[in-house]
Amino acid sequence: MSSYDHFDEEKAREAWASADLKPRPGFGFYPDYVWDALEGFTAFYMSQEEAEGAGVDISNYTIPHKDLFRCSVLNHTWQFLFPGLHDSGIGVCPPLWDKASCIPPVLEGETAVFPCMQMYDGTRYYAKDNATRVCLANGTWANKTDYDFCTEMTVDPDQEPEIEISVHVYFIGYSISLLALIFALCIFLSFREMRCLRHKIHIGLFLTYIFTDLAWILTSLLQSPMMNDQEDENLTIFVVWCTIRNMLNYFHLTTFFWMFLEGLYLFLQVQVPLSLANIKHKHFLIVGWGVPGLVILVWGILRMCLENTNSPADPNDYPGLKKVNRCPFYEDHSVDFPAYKMPVLVLLLANCFFLVWIMVIVISKLRAQTVMEYDRKHWKAAKALIVIIPLLGITYLLTFSGPDKVVYPMAYLVFQCIRALLLSTQGFVITLPYCFLNSEVRSVINTRWERWRLVRSVGADSIRNSTAIMLKTRIDLTPTTGYSTYFTSLDPRAVHNTPQQTTGNNLHGGGQGGDARARSKLLNVPEHHHHNHSNVYDYITNGSNGVGAISIPTSESGKTDAL
């Protein structure tokens, strides 16, 4: 047989004797020479001529199918590849395919130890662990292979490192954008000055980016546990993930519609400002949220009607990827470009037209002799569009193509990271010209801040003044012959030049208290009320003449005396 012409049995013996064995997943531990010989035999039988002669199509062979074919070759060639076993004179359990692994031949009464298989029933396994099967004393295999130590893979082994890096960049960028957008939205909703139509359009743009970033973060957090759930034990995670994933398509589309509305509003404000009187906020809501829903509806119907059922899933796919592919509209389709991507390109072209038209008109007005204030405002808004529209357009075009991963691996890695950075930070970038760096927003915040400080300062002064007046205002009752005297401290500005009253009254603080008596009013009350008013503090209501009046009931008539 020609396939054995170059095989040297002595070299095979030396290779086994060298004990330089290497793990071969699902097959055992083989020296390089013996394994290369087995691969040569397998390649010979699997050559296109031999396959065609046997009527076998090897183009769609999966890993288990190739292992099965290699095991069948080993069944016919193991006497050459294991000369020590063949010449031992003891019974041997021959190679056995158990639908997962090719158990290597061993002497009767021994146990075959081999690395775990690469794949079984669509699930990949770690080859670092070992499986075993016992060869009975009669030269037959036991009924069951022990795969207890074989564990399933939790991540795709073929996942490139640049994918992991880009995922981290996406997650960080979307998180930063989400925080910035929420903060900007709170600013717009907190001030009544930010409630005009233009600001409401900004709010709509912020909201669509908030929903987009939040949907991406949620899908990223749910994807890992969903893909690790190999047995579909928790179907809810998959349903929630798939639902949010499809909503992400809708929110992604709304970002371009709201950006289009930003350009349309500024175009109408510059070109035909009177037309804005007939346009309401609800019209922008219909275009910004309703029209993308119609586009998604048409796209979904076309996808379902034209779904390609002639391309079965790759049987070598990682099992987690198979579950992801079960989500509707996840995989690319030929109808995606005309039904989903084409409307986005049309919106970008329309915004480019708006931008060029606005720039021409605004610059021409700024060069004129008379420049109005609203022209300067239009110029500021146009500068914001200069930054945002190219950002959206360039990043969207980056999703179509990039460097070849095989030909330019380093360029491909850099491209993936740059694209992830630009796409994930779009929300943060739009908050800069529309909120954080916007002079109008900053002016409103500064005005509110100064007003709050002023109110707080005035309120503190009022509290301090009220406390001082309360401490100054004192009603002191002192026993006199038949009367008690009420002294009320008054504001010197209100009672300056008050004449000193001495007739029929006993004034406290005589001698050195003349100035105090000049600022006080003597209030006479019958003495039998003295015991009810000791140590009383109260406010005195100023009359027209600056002198307080207190009404106190008398004991005889029950009437009051106005004092």
Image (spheres, helix red, strand yellow):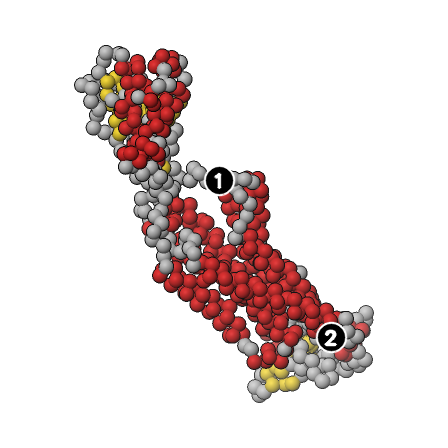
Circle 2 packing at 10 Å, graded few (<14), some (14-19), many (20+), is few
Dot in front, 2 or 1: 1
Q: Nearer the viewer, residue 49 or 148?
A: 49
In this rendering, does residue 222 appear at all? Answer: yes
The residue under the point 61% across, 74% down is 268
The residue under the point 58% across, 58% down is 393
Residue at image mark 1: 160
Task: Work out which quarter of the rendered image holds the C terminus and state it.
Answer: bottom right
At label 1, which amino acid type do we have?
Answer: Glu
Q: Position of residue 261 (x, y in %)?
A: 56, 69
Q: Is residue 208 left or right of residue 530?
A: left
Circle 1 packing at 10 Å, graded few (<14), some (14-19), many (20+), is few
Residue 228 in which image quadrant: top left
> What kind of element bears circle 1?
loop
Task: Work out which quarter of the rendered image holds the N terminus and state it.
Answer: top left
In this rendering, does residue 203 appear at all? Answer: no
Q: Nearer the viewer, residue 123 or 53?
A: 53
The residue under the point 51% across, 74% down is 282
Residue 451 in which image quadrant: bottom right
Q: Position of residue 75 (x, y in %)?
A: 27, 24
Q: Nearer the viewer, residue 499 or 237?
A: 237
At label 2, which amino acid type do we have?
Answer: Met
Residue 386, compared with residue 21, is above or below; it is: below
Residue at image mark 2: 372
Q: Position of residue 553 (x, y in %)?
A: 59, 83
> What kind of element bears circle 2?
loop
Question: Which of disc 1 and disc 2 is earlier in sequence?
Answer: 1
* Count of labels in the image: 2
CA gap, disc 2 to disc 1?
Answer: 57 Å
